[in-house]
Image: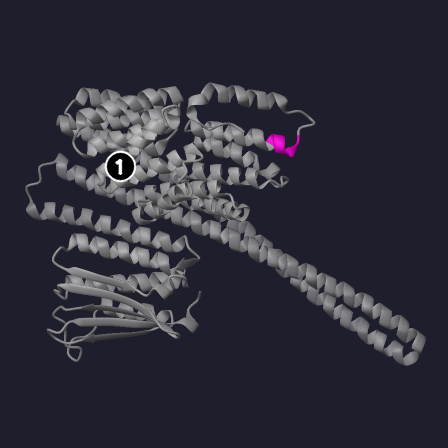
Amino acid sequence: MLKSNGAGADSNAKALDLLKKGLNAKSTAVDSFKYAVSFGIHKSTKGAYSEALQQLESAKENLKRIDNDTLQTDWLMWTAICHKSRGDYSLAFRYVFQALKKYEKMGFSQGIARVYGTLGQIYLQKEDLLSAEKYLLKAKAVLKDKKPLERYLFTTHHLANFYGMQGKIDKALALDREGLQLAEDIPHLKVTFLDNKANCMLYTGKLDSAAHYFRECLKVDFQVGNQKQIADSYSNLAVVALYKKELSQAKKYIDSSMNLLQSASNKFNVAKSLQILIEIHKAEGDFKKALEVTEVYDKSYREMINERKEDALAAYHILYETGKKEDALSKQRLQLAESKAASNRKTAVIVILLLVAALMAIIGFLFYKQQRLKVLQKEKEFQLKEALAVVETQNKLQEQRLEISRDLHDNIGAQLTFIISSVDTTRSSFEINDTSLDTKLQDISAFTKSTILELRDTIWAMNSNVIKFEDLRVRLLNFIEKAQSNVSDVSFGFEVDNELKALTLSSVVGMNVYRTIQEAVNNAIKHAKASEVNVLVNSDDAAIKVIVSDNGIGFNQEVQNFGSGLYNMEKRIEEIGGSFQIISQSENGTRVQFRLYKNLLNT
């Protein structure tokens, strides 16, 4: 198998040529599999992830005939990495967790660390920083002896990236220094630490240093030969030039980036480069060109959305074919019923023959047994087919579910992001003298950002058949931390019983609990004028008890009717079999509490 370091691009190509020449009529499934996977890895190191996935898919047929856990996990991991690089996170998660099961069964610690590092990278790209840090630290702990070195450097790079995103620049730079020293002879990893260091300089306003390290990145990118990475470095240099008001230089860099990305058919990164070009035109004061580029940006996003619609249509055909199979099963059920009726008629004949003569009775009994065995065999065959059909239908529906959630993320999320960009462009491109109109545009932008957050929560629930209570706790903690950052004059308390960590909930139950707590906290912030809001989740043998309390102005329950928000909270909890209660008095705070009975939870 190839070494997948970009520095050996020529040697990789020679190795692939040797592998291909070695294939002949006597080649085994393993030989063919190794060549297809190696070719896929080679394409991925060049940034050609779609071609890489095609090669990996071509190896899948041989994979079924290979009893080799190491080769199977290699295939799973590279497939996951390609999907991650293309932004298909649901598919990336599917393959990477399959690989984790195999590594754990094999007891292969380096493979487990590889999975943890990849999960950390996926969560970083999804901006789930708590999960990213958890998996990256787990990977680093497994690799504490720095072996294998490339895996240790991979994990260290993403941990440095995490600290940079958190604003912990000193920690990030310390890891970058270590990485650059260890990766001196590994170009494709060395460039990642240079990129981290350059971004740290950019975040702290050291623009000349940032430009220097991004240029160093570009030198190594050309050495590795990854077109996508070269284009990214040009984009980064364009951003630095923009900040330094060197607008003509910024244009040259962004043009170079877009030329490379278009030849590589990377529409997502082309859209990112278009956004930078819009900002360059704004800085020049050429708002006409900014609007023209915005139209091109809009067209690019619509093309991506149309591609997703085509994928959705293909998924519909899958469901249609599944429906045809279910119709065929219904016909088989009818045939089985007719077969049973015929068997009963034959049994009646056998009983009459038994009365005629003992000999005929023995013959009839044997005949009856034979017929009965045939019926039982048919029943078992039908049950097996029915079970396989159910499993296949469930798999297809799960795939459709993942497709829908990805469409929500890529299509609706992209459109909402475009709305925010368009509103901001409109506000900055035109002089708006009408204060009410400007306020309305700000409201639209804020509402759209809030809708994106709601959409992410919905996608999170759709991607899960079951939700671990620990995942729900982390999501609630993220929500409360964001609320704390937005409302500085309110203090928040959040406490969850440790015994609940192992509990799992259905996606419906988990989402209703999350939305109810979210609504209660928002009410306390917006309407109660509270200075303290506390969320307490504990458990006993029978139920889970959730309490959201505040020290706000409260209200008189005998006088004031429930609003739609309070009614919706009560409805959510009742729908999942829980009990809901609100306790409030004027000037004495409000207490929202509900119980979820464990014997009724759909876990």
Give the percent coordinates (x, y) of residue 588.
Answer: 13, 74
Q: Where, by quadrant of the figure, is residue 586 drawn? A: bottom left
Identity of the residue drawn at 65% across and 61% down: 383
Q: Which residues are magenta?
A: 28-32
Is residue 166 inside the magenta stretch?
Answer: no
Hey, what amino acid is under mark 1?
A: Ala
Magenta residues, dominant SS class: helix
The quadrant the N terminus occupies is top right
Q: Where, by quadrant of the figure, is residue 65 drawn? A: top right
Q: Where, by quadrant of the figure, is residue 217 drawn? A: top left
Identity of the residue drawn at 22% across and 41% down: 167
Q: Which residue is mark 1?
A: 172
- Label 1 CA crowd tier, 10 Å (few <14, some 14–19, many 20+): many
> Which scheme is used to colour this image of the protein?
one colour
Give the percent coordinates (x, y) of residue 485.
Answer: 18, 52
Left or right of residue 541: residue 30: right
| Outermost residue toward the front in this view | 145
Give the percent coordinates (x, y) of residue 197.
Answer: 26, 30
Q: Image height check: is 322 above or below 25?
A: below
Is residue 30 inside the magenta stretch?
Answer: yes
Q: Nearer the viewer, residue 582 or 137?
A: 137
Work out whether residue 356 can be spotted. yes
Query: Total of numbered circles in the picture?
Result: 1
Q: Image height check: is 461 above or below 547?
A: above
The quadrant the C terminus occupies is bottom left
